[in-house]
Structures are given as structure tokens and as C-alpha cells.
Amino acid sequence: MAAMADIRNIVILTGAGVSAESGIDTFRGGGGLWEKHRVEDVATPEAFARDPDLVLRFYDMRRAAIQEKEPNRAHAALARLDAEWPGDLLIVTQNVDDLHERAGARRVLHMHGTHLNAWCTACDARSRWTGPLIDRPPCPACGARALRPDVVWFGEMPYEMERIYGALQAADLFVSIGTSGAVYPAAGFVREARELGTQTLELNLERSQGSAWFDETRLGPAGELVPAWVDEMLG
């Protein structure tokens, strides 16, 4: 890592490994969430069209479960960095939980949406939502019974990609934390950063599929690696 004086703007990508220590199932790990349901059954627009009750029940369970979880040391450390870092900082998360925000982070972008929003396919409004959707409640904005989880499914475009790429263009450091490097477009961010000459750091339990692209990889639990790295950055 170059001297901290050389680093002004930071983009951080977080994946399921950041929330795993809070008891939230990882996306592709052993015993993970998606092994119990085929992705095709619960996380595609086609699945929702085919069996909306199955999809809504699945997401209702996830929405209820994450509200019982608490942020861990990795979330707390990133919130501290967000509060104290003087330059630009953007935490781009693939996670659909709200643990970054509950830990106190403010500069957060949910590229895959969030469990705690509902999206009305009739009027396009997004509303904060903590209860179930299975009973087809009315949209708070227009009253239509056309709400779905505000989560990006396979085959759909992640949110705010222009903003993300703009932040990568301006970044001096790109850090990937707790992600498999298997899901695009997020898996391509490190390559984008490297081609721009940006420093790159991976903090992960094991090497990701894109590990070779990083200048440095540190292996271990996020709850240990992230606080140590933040201490280093804040001196």
C-alpha cells in the first residue's frame, strides 16, 4: 500500500462476507442461502411471474430475519472510516441488508437493492418496507397492489452503475471486502480500477475468483481484517 498521503478517494465494495459474522447467510458459501433454493426459483423475474407466492414468501422470510441481526465489527469499522475519512468515500454494497447503515455508515450505495424497500411496478415508487408482501398490500404512493421486493434479480440491471463507475474513475484506492468475485458487474470493478492505475486491496476469507487482479490480498475474517485496515488508514 502506498503512503496514506497518496490516497484521497476510496471506493469500497462489500459482499456477503461482511455480513456473515452477523449471522446472515452468504450467497454462495457452503450451507449458504442459495443452496436451499435454486436461484431460478426465487431470484429471477421469470420466477416471480411463474410463482409469485414462492418468491414473496422467500423474501418475506429474509426481510424478517435481517431485522433480527446486528452489525458486526466490520460494519462498525467501515462506519468509523466513513465518519472520519476526509476525502471522498463510497461503500458500494452487494448486500441487501441494512447493517452498514445501522452501524452508522452514510456514504452507502446498494447496487443490488435492499430488503427493506418495496418497489411498486405500477407507479415505480420505492417505499421503506419492513413487513410482509405475501398478502399483496397496497402501494403507499398509488394504492395499487403491485409491490415486489426492491432487490435486483438475475437478469436485471444493478442500480446506479454510472455513479459507481464515476467514483471508480476518481478513486485512488479500491478495496473489495468479503465478496466471491463471481457476480458481474461487481466482479469487474477490480479490473476497471487496475486499468485506471488505482491501487487495489482485497480483504477476504479466501481468495476470490478475481484475486489475481489485486495489488494485495489479506486473508481472514472480515471482523478482524477490516478493523485492522481501518486503524491503518486512520493512523
Image (cartoon, grey):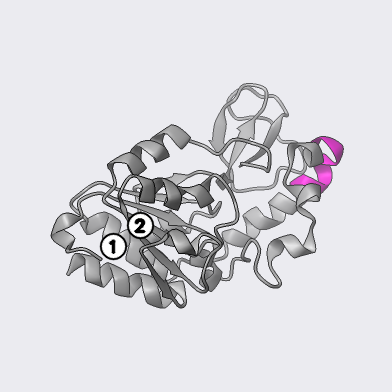
Location of residue 23 in the rendering, given as x and y in whole percent from the top left corner: 58, 71
Task: Give the SS element for disc 2.
Answer: loop
Q: Quadrant of residue 102?
A: bottom left
* Magenta segment includes 17: no
Q: Quadrant of residue 133?
A: top right
Location of residue 52 in the rendering, given as x and y in whole percent from the top left corner: 81, 40
Amino acid type assigned to the residue bearing label 2 in the image: Gly
Residue plotted at (54% across, 44% down): 185
In this rendering, would 76 be left or right of 9? right
Q: Which residue is mark 1?
A: 80
Majority secondary structure of magenta residues: helix
Q: Which residue is mark 2?
A: 104
The answer to whether mark 2 and mark 1 are in CB contact below 8 A is yes
The magenta segment is: 49-57
Query: Split into 4 quadrants, where in the image is the C terminus?
Result: bottom left
Location of residue 16 in the rendering, given as x and y in whole percent from the top left corner: 55, 62
Chain-order first, disc 2 or disc 1: 1
In this rendering, would 32 be left or right of 40? left
Query: Split into 4 quadrants, where in the image is the N terminus?
Result: bottom left
Select label 2 or label 1 by which is in front: 1
